[in-house]
Amino acid sequence: MITYLWIAVGGALGTVARFAVSSAFAQAVGESFPWGTVVVNISGCFVIGVFATITGPDGRLVVAPDLRQFVLIGICGGYTTFSSFSLQTLNLLRNGDVMGAGLNTGVSFGACMLAVWLGAVAGQAFNQIRAG
């Protein structure tokens, strides 16, 4: 049960960091393009790549499993789930599963774009309902 608490705390920290970084970047360069989100996704991918590698089975740092999950699932997951997706895709490629990596990328992108569009359509329909 303590593992879940650590992941929750990490998630809260990651979420606050995402908001802070994205907001600061958007203020600095404007919001005509979601550069803040792009920066968050790229930096989150970098952090999860470094930490997963240095604390993995062949890594130089030995850390407790709870600490590893706190950072990888909690902080990085709260900061950006794109980092988890990218790490999983990299692992598929490292294992020689190019087809799986391509499938993961294509399905994730395609299905998420479809889902966000369907969600927007549903939200627009909801907005059209008159209170009565």
Image (tube, rainbow, N blue to C red):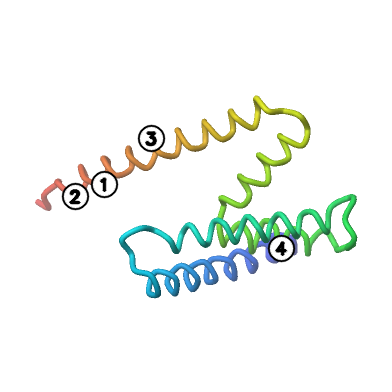
Q: Secondary structure at mark 1?
A: helix
Q: Amino acid at mark 1?
A: Gly
Give the distance between the C-alpha atoms of the residues marked 3 and 1, in whole angstroms. Answer: 14 Å
Task: Answer with mark 3 or mark 1, whichever residue precedes in sequence.
Answer: 3
Give the distance between the C-alpha atoms of the residues marked 3 and 4, in whole angstroms. Answer: 31 Å
Check residue 114 in the rendering and tell me which mark sits there, or answer none.
3
Return the x and y of residue 7 as percentages of the image width and height: 67, 62
Q: Is residue 30 above or below residue 44?
A: below
Check residue 127 in the rendering and tell me which mark sits there, or answer none.
2
Give the distance between the C-alpha atoms of the residues marked 2 and 1, in whole angstroms. Answer: 6 Å
Q: Amino acid at mark 4?
A: Phe
Discs 3, 4 touching: Cβ within 8 Å:
no
* Residue at 59% in and 61% down: 43
Return the x and y of residue 1 as percentages of the image width and height: 73, 60
Location of mark 4 (residue): 70
Task: Answer with mark 3 or mark 2, whichever residue precedes in sequence.
Answer: 3
Q: Secondary structure at mark 2?
A: helix
